[in-house]
Image (spheres, rainbow, N blue to C red):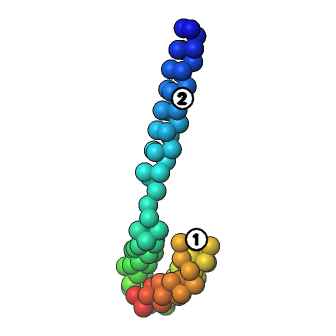
Amino acid sequence: MENLFVYVVMFILLLGVILLLFKKSSINQKPSYLKKEEISKKYEYELLKLISTYEKDETLLKEKKLEFIKQANAELNNNIFFDESEIKALISRLASL
């Protein structure tokens, strides 16, 4: 009888640990619209940083900006959060900075 009680208590503790693990993993996920916004802001920040670095040399700035936009376009095409129209809108916004 005591063995049955020990098994029941261990089973309940195991279920509790499993529930805590699943609950903890779902808390850390962000909604897709928030993740999109963070990614967009990251690319804008990086481009503005690049612009401020090369603002003295206009030709080098254009070259670096073009490289950055090409790289951003390639990365965004592999990103699951963005569809084709959102990528085009973000790239055109980056190009206008």
Q: Is residue 26 above or below residue 79?
A: above
Please tell me whether mark 1 sits on a helix, a strand or a loop: loop
The residue tagged 2 is 14
| Image coords of residue 62 (percent x, y) | 49, 89
Label located before the other in sequence (2 or 1):
2
Of residues 1 and 79, the one nearer the viewer is: 1
Horizontally, residue 88 falls left or right of residue 78, namely left
Query: Dividing the picture into quarters, in which one does residue 78 lie?
Result: bottom right
Residue at (50% x, 26% y) in the render: 13
Mark 2 in CB contact with mark 1 (< 8 angstroms): no
Q: Is residue 3 above or below residue 62?
A: above
Q: Check the picture and name the quadrant holding the C terminus.
A: bottom left
Give the spatial CA distance, label 2 vs label 1: 35 Å
Residue at (44% x, 75% y) in the render: 40
The residue tagged 1 is 80
| Image coords of residue 96 (percent x, y) | 42, 91
Q: How many marks?
A: 2
